[in-house]
Amino acid sequence: MDDIIIGAVALVAVLLFFLYQKPKTKRYKLPPGPPRLPVIGNLHQLQTTNPQRFFYGWAKKYGPIFSYEIGCKTMVVISSAELAKELLKTQDVNFADRPQHRGHEFMSNGRSDMALNHYTPFYREVRKMGMNHLFSPTRVATFKHVREEEAKRMMDKINKAAEKSEPVDISELMLTFTNSVVCRQAFGKKYNEDGKEMKRFIEILYGSQSVLGKLFFSDFFPFTGYVLDDLTKLTAYMKECYVKQETYVEEIIDETLDPNRVKPETESMVDLLMQIYKDQPFSFEFTINNVKGVIMDIVVAGTDTAAAAVVWGMTYLMKYPQVMKKAQAELREYMAQRGSTFATEDDVKNLPYFRALVKETLRIEPVIPLLIPRACIQDTKVAGYDIPAGTTVNVNAWAVSRDEKYWGPNPDEFRPERFFEKDVDFKGTDYEFIPFGSGRRMCPGMRLGAAMLEVPYANLLLNYNFKLPNGMKPEDINMDVMTGLAMHKSEHLKLVPEKVRK
Ligand code: HEM
């Protein structure tokens, strides 16, 4: 029955589209792209699994800049280092906006946050505050003990499994690690990992993340899109996730305001935001909705990115045992000299091969492979093609980090040594390697994100040897990604740990 209704509404959408459509894109010389169907454009061709690989395929066919359509919207994808530089450096201001997205608007109380806000003077002030306070090197350092403690808790669990030679779910362990770290950094809350509150937090987080990753018909099909969103129950799902998210964040804020509350040992991020709310240091009012929005940015953008990166890294290491051996040897030799079995954030700085491994991990699987979409503010030209104002542009960082002009003939090979041959970093100025983006909208949490992934990653390699379970072979590992803001490996990575020193 649902299908019949959707079909009928889609038909009405088609008719209305033809009635109201003006040939407005005709005068533009748009980037080339696949042929489109009337009304839906290329909607039928899009793949939800592995979109970065799918777009890479289109880039091979249509070039490093191509366009496609969904309903009434033109979308552009950039897939080379040179064009990434054009967009994120030369024309950075013009591409610093975020596109229309019903889910983003709704979940962020009309874009009260930072990550999804339009490129407004208010956004610029909030972002500056973020860079100077929330994500400053000093603040990242104040949470060092939190990350190290949580990494030790993770290893306690692996030790237990190692004693019984049982497989551990690396994906699950890493998500628990990042969830616990984020709750402590952001809210000053130490949840019992398997307790009710942590489960609730995870459910809310996944709900919010999934709404942000959904495609809403209303963004692409005027008039009927809202009806389709309703019929497919997307609107109801979004509202349900919103209510859960709002209730949770409001509770956190109320707790922060409670004069009898036991203060966390380190000022949490929500404490800092509430101080800003009280001080009102901006030329614009910083409202409670802004506090909520920025908190959700930190939680949504900060939680599963680091977890996804370590899981991808361990996956590739299982496929490239010689790289695993080299990284383990460096860590084990260095830590033996230090006389410790726990690699700290300071230790990691002295391990060149491990640092190259982290970069190679983020190159081969940048965890936000299409970055967060940008929107073009004014009509412009890129590579000789017209990009009309309002166009959504994705930079395919996954494709860029396979640009053979910069990475040689075997970009799919997992080889940390390439970072000794080439002095390239992820700080946003080497456009062939942009896992944190670049320019005005570059990830402000880069330092924090790197810190969150390095310690667990290093300690996994230092303390254990790993085997695949049940006679599985490295070539059997499923490499599909699960779409969302951060692209996780869709199948959890399970490995059997063997403790190096018993
Ligand atoms: C390995 C970890 C991480 C990776 C790979 C990563 C990657 C990214 C990328 C690719 C973007 C989009 C940049 C662009 O559009 O050019 C982004 C944006 C953002 N990230 Fe991260 N991120 C990570 C960790 C974090 C953490 C820990 C936080 C906060 C606690 C964070 C907060 C944000 C925010 C707020 C934005 C939006 C910035 C804006 O629109 O101005 N990220 N991140």
Image (cartoon, helix red, strand yellow):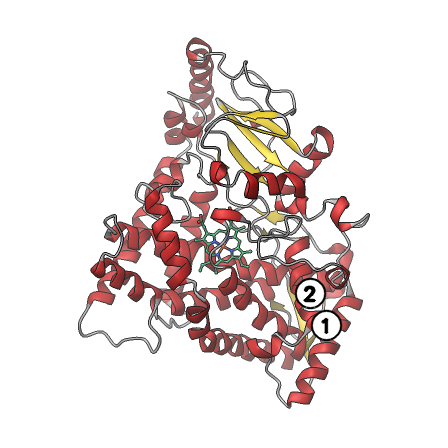
Q: Is mark 2 within 8 Å of ligand 1?
A: no
Q: Looking at the figure, which quarter contains the C terminus? A: bottom right
Label 2 near label 1: C-beta < 8 Å? yes
Instruction: Give coordinates of residue 239: x percent, y percent.
Output: 33, 42
Residue 69 position, x and y percent, is 55, 25
Q: What is the secondary structure assignment of the residue under circle 1?
A: helix
- Return the residue nearer the eye: 320 or 99: 99
Compare residues 41 and 290 and report the one nearer the observer: 290
Q: Is residue 267 above or below residue 87?
A: below
Most extreme residue toward the right is 409
Task: Determine which residue is flagged by label 1.
Answer: 327
How dense is the environment of label 1, judged by Cα within 10 Å: few (below 14), some, or many (20 and up)? Answer: many
Q: Amino acid at mark 2?
A: Leu
Residue occupied by mark 2 = 357
Residue located farthest toward the top when viewing the structure as drawn: 19
Q: Quadrant of residue 116?
A: top left
- Asked whether the viewer can see residue 164, the reply is no
Numbered circle sitting on residue 481: none
